[in-house]
Amino acid sequence: MKPLLTLALLTLTTATYAQTGPVKVEVKQTAGRYELLRGGQPYFIKGAGGGQYPERVKAYGGNSLRTWDTGGAAKVLADANQNGLTVMMGLDVARERHGFDYNNPQAVAAQLQKVKAEVLKYKDDPALLFWGIGNELNLEYKNPKVWDAVEQIARMIHEVDPNHPTSTVLAGLNQQEVDYIKSRCPSVDILSINTYAGLAAIPEQVRTMGWTGPYVVAEWGPTGHWESPVTPWKASVEETSAQKAAVYQSRYEASVAKDTTQCLGTYVFLWGQKQERTPTWYGIFTEDGKESEVVDVMQYLWSGQWPANRAPHLADFRLNNQPATAGIYLQPGKTYPAVVTVTDPDQDPLTYRWELLPESTDLKSGGDRESRPVAVPGRIPARAGAQTTLKAPAKEGAYRLFIYTYDGHDNVAVANIPFFVRK
């Protein structure tokens, strides 16, 4: 555990919320500048998407969590209260791409009542910051009546909860959705945007598309799999943990840090781990909770200070003397060199774990749940270090070679290389 986290845990009792009722949250505009006020005090969101490791959010300088639905809301709110954090509470609104019909008034009315029950259940929790009505409802949709349903929900929230603003979350930003929300959703107080490689362009896009109100970046992170280089067999190439750390910092500093008039803050994605294309693409922690270089960057962006012990830095990774972007083909059963170059800022001794996975075939859209591929054993020598060999699988097809490098202080550097086995 990092020294800063240990210190924070010792002082957590001073950070918890003593209030038992709702805390008034409102959006104020002064001289053309929007600001979120919580309990009358300015509140800029330094948020983390996901409910894992709330104590680390607090310890590293963050102040808020985001959920996508109310499934685990009681625990997330309790953890937030315990750690002096707030919550952007997601309200799950059905998506057209999952088969919901917004031309069906009975289904829309039933959904409104379901969401109303969720709002009534959690509206008075002191950790609640604002409501997120749906997530990426504009993804793969055709029926604009979804925005009428969002307006009905937002209006209902204002009727039953006078203490918290409303928002809806878009996948990216385009003119059509901005126009729809402006015209059809007057009860939506905050526009929330999910973006990845495009983060730096968001402030300009918001203005170009005519959104003059406040906004939150509700998800941002690495370059998305749909934005990345692709191999000839259509496998997206993932950035290394070092490359991710660089783009997280540069994109944040080029966008959010400079927009002091409309941006109310952000939620970094993902404060935890998930399988989406790979087990490492979007989570800034590994499955066993180790922290990548991205976590160091987030501590710096939130607090202005780097951690006392930094994560390893992965400078280069090659399979058969080729980088991940090369489109690597291997022959079945043959042995090839694999070399990773990692340095540690604190000169900590490093250990290595290699893993071979088939390319994932359980591919979804919009962050829907995917299953993790089963590892292929016995293709890398036991206790392999920074330089090792890979015996290509006998079965033709697409694979990825993963490397995890640990520093002994709960930090890790991560990368993978896609390759294709063919005769």
Image: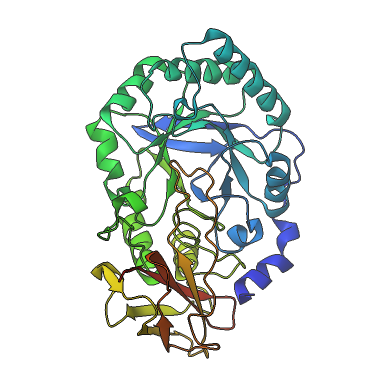
Residue 44 position in % (x across, y down): 48, 46
- Decide if residue 334 is on the left or right side of residue 98: left
**Which image quarter holds the C terminus?**
bottom left
Considering every residue shown, the one lying at the far left of the view is: 208
Which picture quadrant has residue 230? bottom left
Q: Residue at x 32, y 61 (%)?
A: 250
**Which image quarter holds the N terminus?**
bottom right
Front-lying residue, 100 or 334: 334
Which picture quadrant has residue 146? top left
Against 127, residue 255 (above or below) is below
Against 105, residue 252 (above or below) is below
Front-lying residue, 314 or 161: 314
- Decide if residue 262 is on the left or right side of residue 377: left
Considering every residue shown, the one lying at the far top of the view is: 105
Q: Residue at x 45, y 25 (%)?
A: 96
Q: Is residue 161 visible?
A: no
Residue 86 position in % (x across, y down): 61, 44
Q: Is residue 62 visible?
A: yes
Q: Residue at x 67, y 71 (%)?
A: 7
